[in-house]
Amino acid sequence: MDEVKRFARDCGMTVEQVLSGRDGSFPIAEKAWTYQPGESLVRPELLGSLSTLMRQLHQWYLKAAKKGLHTLMVKVREEDYFRDDSICIYLADLWYLYNLDALDKSIVSTYCL
């Protein structure tokens, strides 16, 4: 209970306000945007703000997911990474790119190609 009292004091609230949270002191957070297979990678209100290439990739993703694809094979040229190679990117990883969350260097590098 001492921790609750300290917390309430530090926040400028009463212990009752901390314990109840019903008076509007704690705003309800917006639900986090999470990856759902086959669903939009960005919130609907942000679709219009995507660059042309990001919008095209998003449209391709929606079609590919609808067909049941789970991965994207990307060919890497020798002039890009000093050898010819292929990279497998999981479509779920595109969500991180679009939401700038836990970005993987290989995904960003591949997008830049």
Image: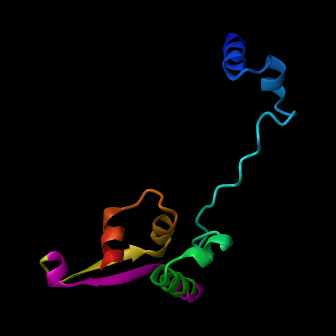
Q: Residue furthest left?
A: 82
Specify the color scheme. rainbow
Hey, which residue is sitting farthest right in the picture?
Answer: 23
Q: Which residue is nearer to you in this view: 35 or 47?
A: 47
Could you say which is closer to the camera, residue 89 or residue 26? 26
Regarding residue 93, the answer to whether it shows in the image is: yes
User: Residue 71 magenta-drawn?
Assistant: yes
Q: Nearer the viewer, residue 66 or 40?
A: 40
Query: What quarter of the picture does the N terminus occupy?
Result: top right
The picture quadrant where one finds residue 82 is bottom left
Which residue is drawn at the image coordinates 63% and 60% (left, top)? 33
Q: Horizontal and vertical percent for residue 56? A: 50, 86
Task: Find residue 36 and report its horizontal and vertical position in percent.
Answer: 61, 69
- Residue at image coords 55%, 86%: 59
Q: Name the quadrant containing residue 13.
A: top right
- The residue shown at (84%, 20%) is 16
Q: Is residue 83 left or right of residue 5?
A: left
Residue 38 shows in the view: no
Q: Is residue 102 above or below residue 73?
A: above
Horizontally, residue 105 falls left or right of residue 98, namely left
Give the residue at the far top of this rendering: 2
Which range of residues does the magenta coloring cover?
63-81
- Give percent across and percent down for residue 111: 36, 76
Q: Which quadrant of the view contains residue 65?
A: bottom right
Q: Is residue 1 left or right of residue 75?
A: right
